[in-house]
Amino acid sequence: MCGIVGYIGTKQAAPIILDGLSKLEYRGYDSAGMAIYDGSKINITKSVGRLKVLENLTHGGESMPGLCGIGHTRWATHGVPNNTNAHPHFNAAETIAVVHNGIIENYLQLRRMLIDKGYQFVSETDTEVLAHLLDYYYKGNPLEAVTKVLHRVEGSYALGILFADCPDQIFAARKDSPLIVGQNEDGCFIASDVPAILKYTRKVYYVDNQEVVRLRADHMHFYTVDEEEISKTPVIIEWDANAAEKAGYEHFMLKEMYEQPKTVNDTLMPRIKDNDIVIEELNMTDEELRAIRKIHIVACGSAYHAGMTGKYVIEGLARVPVEVDLASEFRYRNPILEEGAMVVVISQSGETADTLAALRESKARGFKVLGIVNVVGSSIAREADNVMYTWAGPEIAVATTKAYSAQLIALYLLAMKLGRVRGQIDGDTFQSLLGDLKCLPDQIELLLNNKNKIQKFANRYIGAKDVFFIGRGIDYAISLEGSLKLKEISYIHSEAYAAGELKHGTISLIEEGTLVAAVSTQPDLYAKTISNMVEVKARGAFVLAVTCEENKEIEKAADYVIYIPETNPYFANSLAIIPLQLFGYYVSVGKGCDVDKPRNLAKSVTVE
């Protein structure tokens, strides 16, 4: 969702803020703005559209001089995208400026109270309430005003605040929306994600829930919402700064697809030691693993699709029942968590609002939570009982590719570890599985290098209106992710169906020329899937098949076949998803879509 960047120091703030906001464009936004203190007052410039508009308006920040400022890219929740609703927001006297990520749930109640006290509102946003509420409580002590506001508001927030009376300070606060602060020899920074300030500092502090930070040019102090000062330990970011750049690729998404062999290797190999799987982060003994009676996997979007694959793999290899839930449903359905259950939450960012809420609900009920996340120090990483990191590095494109592949690897490793300690996998089978896992990076690279064939095929379907993906078992889970990749970046209507459900209504949607992508990687289900392909082809569909090299029989039913290398059927998703990612990418490029920043979408969904 929205992005926040702030700076106070010895350099001009506006160019630094614009540069930081450019690193957060992947989060999704529809307007942008900055508030800069120029030595006598706070000036605000805002614009609708891409950040480039704001850059042009401010001549790259040069027309907004000042050593202290805050900036924001907004993804509209309350109020349509326009200049009035864009952040930052002022109080009436234009002496307090606020940027805000999140949602203030009781803003209508607060708005009515403030109107009754004579305050006038110009925007439709919940954020303007914060500016006027700060004004209401400000009596010369900005920290006191901030903490009083935080005691009144309900919901989620990451805040950056300027007071004209205190031009040597920026205030930041956080609850349920990510926020970090950092420092170098020139000044201090606030940001909603690491890439925004990685160019300037690797020493960052993760702001925890209901904490306030007072930043000056040369130091910062941390407080609770009761104004009690606290100490924090910095985290040194180990990312290569170049990892957040395109490195010559046309799009971040293409670059990140080509990083998948390394991502898979980096997530896999540190956990294979002496021909065994060692997952030290689990902090669970073999006895504790054997005591698990059920696993609940909770996630959103692509992470949910990875969890769907995880269900088949864990149940197949470890014989532990697995239930997979959308986090937005799990948190509200009063789930039944029985004794012996373990909850696994999956999130690339570690900040996904619904997934974080599911984690907290599970822990409140006394159940152990394992987080599978990519971002070190994120909320889920800090709050889960144990964490398996997916070493994917920064993923900038909104549509996930390499983080999804890393999540699959983490789930494979967990399934094999459980299966081994529970006596469900014998020694020879275990070594065979390990051998197949180790081959995956090279096999993925082979598929990526065969992209020309997929690109030519994708060019035929740039004008498609509807595309359907079908599969059974793990192939259904692959189909879900393949369909999502296509729809989210190309805007083509696409759906995935369990192939066995075709006769239950779905097949009525097939007409002459409709593209149906049939995924068939499970040998036990080849014949069944071929039968479904024949069904749709008989009704005019053009059938694209993604299958294993041994399955030559499929050529009788398919119009076009993409083969993947042989691997254990449990690991087939890691290979079959590659041509589907490439297909979605090249269709989107052919249509001229903004591949890295698709409309209406955000990288980190930090509000409901």
Image: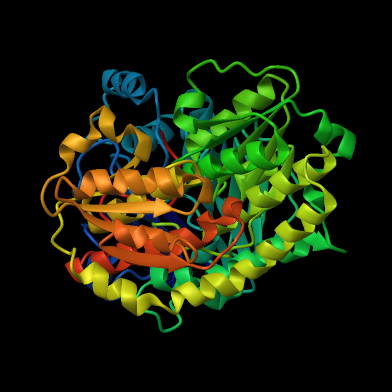
Q: Is residue 45 visible?
A: no
- Residue 14 image offset from top left, x and y in percent: 39, 68
Residue 209, image quadrant:
top right
Q: Residue at x 44, y 64 (%)?
A: 578
Q: Specify the color scheme.
A: rainbow
Front residue of 228 and 545: 545
Height in image: 336 above or below 391?
above
Front residue of 562 and 603: 562
- Residue 134 image offset from top left, x and y in percent: 43, 35
Q: As drawn, is 466 to the left or to the right of 366?
A: left
Q: Quadrant of the C terminus?
A: top left
Q: Residue at x 59, y 58 (%)?
A: 406
Residue 286, image quadrant:
top right
In this view, the residue farthest toward the left is: 512
- Residue 507 image offset from top left, x and y in percent: 21, 37
Front residue of 236 and 514: 514
Height in image: 109 above or below 523?
above
Q: Residue at x 67, y 62 (%)?
A: 437
- Residue 427 image offset from top left, x and y in percent: 84, 52
Height in image: 118 above or below 449?
above
Front residue of 351 and 499: 499
Q: Residue at x 53, y 15 (%)?
A: 334
Number of numbered callouts drawn = 0
Q: Is residue 294 visible?
A: yes
Height in image: 170 above or below 586?
above
